[in-house]
Amino acid sequence: MKRRAALLTFILLAFPALNEAGETLLTGVASVSGARFHKGATEEDRGSATAILDVKAVKPLDGLYLTAALRLRDSTDGRYSWSLDPLDDEPDPSAIALRELKLRASPIPALDLEAGRFELGWGKTDGYSPADAFLPRDLTDPFSEEKLGLWGVRISGQRENLRGELVASPFTTPWRFPEPGSRYLPLPFPRKFIRETVGDPPDGGFAALRALVNVEEWDLGLWARTGVLPAPWLEFVQTPYGFAPTRRFTRETGVGVEVSRLIGTGVARAEAALLDPEAYAPGDSLIVALGFEHPLPEGTLLFTWAKAFTRGGEEDAIPLDRALLPLFISALHHQPEWGSVRLVWTAGLRHGDGVVKLETGYDLTENWKHTLTIDQPYGPRSGPLGRLRDAARIAAALSYSW
Amino acid sequence: MLRHLVSTLLITVSLAVAARAEDPRELLVESEARHRSKTLSYAGELTVHSKEGKVRTKGWRSYREGYAGDAKVLVRFLSPPEVRGVGFLSLSRPGKSSDQWLYLPSMKRERRIGAQDRDASFVGTDFSYEDMEEFDHKRYDLRLKGEENLDGQPCWVIEAVPQEEGGRSTFARRLLTLRKDNLYLVRQEYYQTGETSPAKRLTLGDLRETHGRWIAHRLEMSSLKKGSRTVVVLKDVVFDKPHPSERFTLLNLTREEGD
């Protein structure tokens, strides 16, 4: 408790101190939320409360930009650990997360150099993008996928309508998953018999290269990457006590294309990726994603279909970056003047399961916002989404941003 | 004979006076020549007043290079917090719809947006995406409707009808009101097909001479049917200062910390 208080005090003083320097731009969001879960078979509490504080500082320094973003959070479900985890590679998310800490320089106007910790967004299709799937994620809450930053360097440049990007990271930031046996990762045997093993990722990180060009209605991209895949695959190893889930990691090489084109009033998007893991178990894959965005008077309607074609591999191995495929996602975003409405339907096409998410946000003022969210999985429990039925929930949040 | 001579003279003078009636195309060309700048940048504060009286404010920085068919526009939102860092880039292509992209800090990537839906509201305001583009009179048939006194200023009123039927403009016609003294556009009214009263009205006020050019520092777009209005107040207006060469690029669009 004392360490928590000391850390919080230090952080809460540090960011205003940056602002005192005069030019630092300080922004943030503070939110509290409460969730109520469906009464299911698990022994967990039916309710939880969470508090999150996001603070971001951007400071120009003679042509450079220093950006720091910190997240503080805690929850009554004990999900967060109060340990410092600067590499973000512990299985449990830390209550203190350094989301960004980077320096950007532009030695010439058409070239950016970034170093430190930053988040990336690649790809074109919405909801699922094979170009984006190699980036680290926190899925401890499967209904609120959180992207994680990575430590590395990034070089971006543009000449005429051609852009290039090179990213290299010496560390692996593994994907995070819920505790096996919990409502967010239910398994078909009692929780007390589950002993999960998390293998260590291979040494080193990854490198990736991306080239983009826009020609009239077309946006085209090519990418290639090699290194440790942060998403593990899951194996179930039999023990005297039952089946123990084991996360294993491998290196993987992948290449891909991404395309978008204006069609009528909408935008069509497509991606394809060839993935070749070093380990045999996950199998070689061709992943295809197709999407379409149609504008509405005060919003958009999005569709995405994605499928993986796998060759070889072991049937019992579940590569977690493509475990939901094939899937179909449709999303309606509506932004009336009072706030926002988001309705997302994720349908697993293999098992006939899925999740329906409804989120409404009401802008109380320019800074205060109230959000209500319903996550309702459905379908057979044999499916990765249907098995989340005990985690169906309704959540309300109040946030303040500055 | 004298009567005949006087009649001839009167007719000749009348014809000469009629011939001096202004040509609307020439008026707009002259207006462009006086007020068109090679570049423009400003900080804007935008306030949306809904029919129910609710008020929302947004802040942005806007940069423009070129004009009409060769214009490049970059808008970066500064406030409120939930849209801070959002960027909009529009690159005009002669004779075609503009290429437009939106950068969302939450996704850390830019996305192409369909420029064809030009009557859609721009970020929840009474301005549409079409309104964000420069008015290109060459794409319109023009007719001088007459004269009007607006806020004590004598003005020309010009009717503009899009040349392409069912084409790029979402309105059937516009009425442009230009001040006679400085040929500055002070009002624009937008009419839908078959309507005799305007659906939207743009008024430009608080005219000030800045760096040798006149510019309205207050723009108000009223959606007359919806009952809402959006007011934009311009600050830190700078004309004709060359933009950095990479300002209007996708690389720059993704620089959420600053251009």
Image (cartoon, coloured by chain):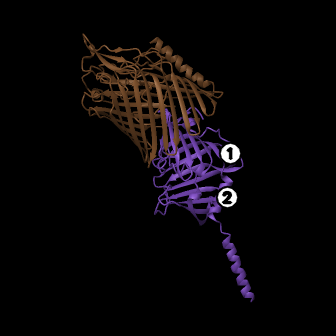
Kind of residue at badge 2:
Glu
- Colour of chain A, in one word, is brown
Kind of residue at badge 1:
Asp
Secondary element at image label 2: helix
Say whether mark 1 and mark 2 are on the same chain.
yes
Q: Position of residue A329 (x, y in %)?
A: 35, 37
Tell which residue pokes out farthest to the bottom in this image: B1
Q: Residue at x 58, y 63 (%)?
A: B142
Image-based side of A46 in relation to A216, left or right = left
Tell which residue pokes out farthest to the right in this image: B2
Q: Position of residue A170 (x, y in %)?
A: 50, 18
Report the disc number at residue B240. 1
* Residue B80 visible in the snapshot: no
Where does the N terminus of chain A fall, quadrant-wise? top left
| Spatial CA span between label 2 and label 1 | 18 Å
Identify by letter the chain in purple.
B
Q: Residues within 10 Å of mark 2 (few under 14, many from 20)?
A: some
Report the disc number at residue A175. none
Mark 1 chain: B
Q: Is residue B144 above or below residue A161?
A: below
Q: Position of residue A190 (x, y in %)?
A: 25, 17
Q: Earlier in the sequence, mark 2 or mark 1?
A: 2
Question: Who is closer to the viewer here, B102 or B155?
Answer: B102
Tell which residue pokes out farthest to the front in this image: A312
* Residue B64 visible in the snapshot: yes
Q: Mark 2 and 1 residues: CB-CB less than 8 Å, in contact?
A: no
Q: Residues within 10 Å of mark 1 (few under 14, many from 20)?
A: some
Which residue in the structure is indicated by mark 2? B30
Q: Position of residue A42 (x, y in %)?
A: 26, 21
Q: Residue at x 39, y 17 (%)?
A: A91
Question: Who is closer to the viewer here, A305 or B106?
Answer: A305
